[in-house]
Image (cartoon, grey):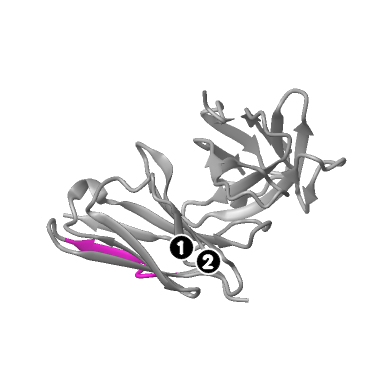
Amino acid sequence: AQKITQTQPGMFVQEKEAVTLDCTYDTSDPSYGLFWYKQPSSGEMIFLIYQGSYDQQNATEGRYSLNFQKARKSANLVISASQLGDSAMYFCAMREGWGTGANSKLTFGKGITLSVRP
Amino acid sequence: DAGVIQSPRHEVTEMGQEVTLRCKPISGHDYLFWYRQTMMRGLELLIYFNNNVPIDDSGMPEDRFSAKMPNASFSTLKIQPSEPRDSAVYFCASRTREDTQYFGPGTRLTVL
């Protein structure tokens, strides 16, 4: 079974509107971290935001927020006030054993392409 | 602060040649990861090190690939001999034990 699922093939949003990128995950480990990365057309992988499984509040970083629904095992990325520069591929990732010092790897989803229309 | 540094940024070589990719992790980071990204297979973890020791190399595709980390500030990924199917973007990333993982800019490898 896939540990990280990103099923939206491609998303379009109008500039200045908000957009939600979906991510569901699968783990039996009670300690884990969830991450979102952005990959623009230039190719670099840019860290955006993370959420720990024990965090009580949803993570926020500027225009990015993470809608964390633990019971549903979803960690959707919300981008508010979209900008043209937000056009990119977005990857959701999970690291099990987060906070326990476990030597575990990041597992990535297949990514979602977001296009912002002017 | 300097991020993860990779060199070269672009490499074009001919089939059969040896290719060496280089990475300098963020200072103080004791985990280092090598990834490969292709359209077909997405982002694949090849190998990772902790305190310069290889921990998991199960993602290394075959014996033509090798990776070393002789010290805390330098790692190499070598492909010998290279093949056209090795064409991809190779990323290096680093982190501390409980920190976020940060990626380098990647090396775009083309094997003709």
Specify start and end residues of the magenta stretch as a single range: B6-13
| Alpha carbon distance from label 2 to label 1 | 6 Å
Name the disc covering residue B53, or none. 1
Q: Are marks 2 and 1 on the same chain?
A: yes
Q: Residue at x 34, y 61 (%)?
A: B67
Residue drawn at (78%, 54%), measured in percent from left and top? A62
Residue located 28% across and 67% down the image? B20
Taking the view exactly as shown, the residue that stands out farthest to the right is: A56
Residue A80 visible within the image: no
Residue B21, image quadrant: bottom left
Residue holding disc 2: B51
Can residue A57 be seen at all in this image of the molecule? Answer: yes
Please report contact status of discs 2 and 1: CB closer than 8 Å, yes or no. Answer: yes
- Other residues around mark 2 within 10 Å, as few (<14) / some (14–19) / many (≥20): few
Whether residue B65 is in magenta: the answer is: no
Q: Identify the subunit bearing mark 2.
A: B
Say whether residue B81 is left or right of residue A105: left
Q: Position of residue A26 (x, y in %)?
A: 62, 27
Q: Residue at x 52, y 37 (%)?
A: A111
Left or right: residue A67 compared with residue B74: right
Q: From the image, which quarter does the C terminus of chain A lie in?
A: top right
Which subunit holds the residue at mark 1?
A: B
In this rendered view, identify the residue nearer to me: A106 or B37: A106
